[in-house]
Amino acid sequence: MEALVGQLMEELNCEVVFTLPILGGIPVSEAVVVSWIIMAVLFLVCFIFVRGFDVTHPGKKQIVLETAVSGIYHFFDEILGEAGRDYVPYLMSVAIYVGASNLIGLFGFKPPTKDINVTAALALMSIVLIEVAGIRKKGGKGWLKSFAEPIAIVAPINVLEIFIRPLSLCMRLFGNVLGSFVIMELLKQVVPAVLPVVFSAYFDIFDGIIQAYVFVFLTALFVKEAIE
Amino acid sequence: MLSLDGWTLFFTVLNVIVLFVGLRLLLFKPVLKIISQREEMIKTQLKEAAAKEQQAEQLKNDYQEKLKDAGHKAEEIIAQAKSRAAREQSEAAVKAKEEAEKMLEKAREEIRTEQEQARKEVQADIAILAMEAARKIMKTGDVHDAAGK
């Protein structure tokens, strides 16, 4: 039991992989390294696949990739509409990043989204995007006024939302990924073979994709709300 | 796990920005460009196809018109030929009739002249005969003889 707990704690820890020897040593955590790996793989895949693309004679890979990209694009485009078209590529990037991060547990890496700092950063960027979209659409004054809508008395709640939204985004993603990670690690300790595959299909793939979806979907909804 | 760590936060923000720029450059822009190019191409091709169809339709109509015209012309030509043939036929009939009449007239004329001639000849013969008879009478002096002979 002691050993199990020890192992589990080790898995749960987000270790510092190495320290950059500048500015008095910058610690680089596992989540960041895994993120770099994800980014490198994504860039490489994009670079290899997209290079051979053809307008008139698309291959199978091209069709799959085009369908995926245009599918995600239209998903966000439908939520945001004409006015929010500028924010679609960012949301697509975050969707791909969060999705890949949640699924990378399948390859034996610790998902970066298991680190609360990663989800916190993503949530911070989301709230910045939401408020910037609001300011761009309504102007500084209009944006400030929008806090008093529909009536002035709800203004404190609207201000609170600036903090609540990223917090809930951050915690939801972090909690889901951490939870499924813990369950999977426990399962692997108890039953090392076969059974984890079944649960992995749910916790890693299904939940991972759902959480990525929820994160970007909510961000898109908030942006939509801000630019309305 | 739950400890807030500014560097990871910072790196993640940086990572997401880099990923956004990179994916935009490597994936979204080229793929969406290709899709829009294809859409554009399909649109122009559809337009061209519609134009060609219209052209073909017009050509078809033209040909049908021409065919109809040709049919009309053929009918006209046939009608003309028929009427000409009929005219010629009637003309020929009239001519033949005229000719026949002419010939008949001529024949009648001939008959008449021949009759005249015959009459003149007979008259001359009678005169000769009368003179002959008179001569004979004068020779024999017998009227009866001459008459009886």
Image (cartoon, coloured by chain):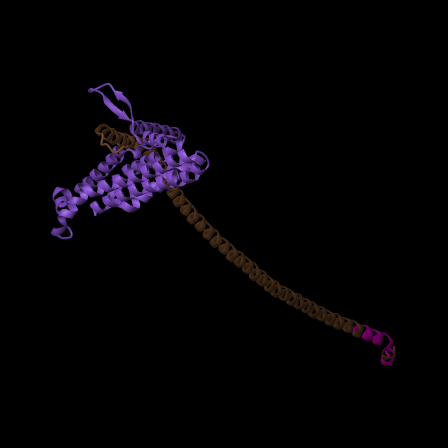
Count of marks placed on residues:
0
Establish if A87 lies above or below A19: below
- Across and down, in percent, residue A171 comes to 26, 40
Question: Going by the image, does A106 lie left or right of B13?
Answer: right
- One can see residue A150 in this view: yes
Q: Nearer the viewer, residue A13 or A102?
A: A13
Question: Going by the image, does B124 lie left or right of B106?
Answer: right
- One can see residue A54 in this view: no
Q: Nearer the viewer, residue A10 or B127?
A: A10
Establish if A22 lies above or below A218: above
Q: Residue furthest bottom?
A: B144
- Could you say which quadrant of the image residue B107 lies in? bottom right
Range of the magenta residues?
Answer: B131-146
Q: Residue furthest top?
A: A21
- Across and down, in percent, residue B138 comes to 83, 75
Establish if B122 lies above or below A71: below
Secondary structure of the magenta portion, mostly? Answer: helix
- Across and down, in percent, residue A72 comes to 34, 41
User: Which colour is chain B painted?
Assistant: brown
Which residue: 15% across, 52% down? A150
User: Which colour is chain A painted?
Assistant: purple
Q: Nearer the viewer, residue B89 or B79?
A: B79
Question: Going by the image, does A166 lie left or right of A109?
Answer: left
Which residue: 22% across, 43% down? A165
- Across and down, in percent, residue B46 comes to 40, 45
Q: Residue furthest front?
A: A1
Q: Nearer the viewer, residue B129 or A190?
A: A190
Examine the structure image and report whether residue B136 is included in the region drawn in magenta: yes
- Could you say which quadrant of the image residue B24 lies in? top left
- Could you say which quadrant of the image residue B145 lies in? bottom right
Examine the structure image and report whether residue A50 is included in the region drawn in magenta: no
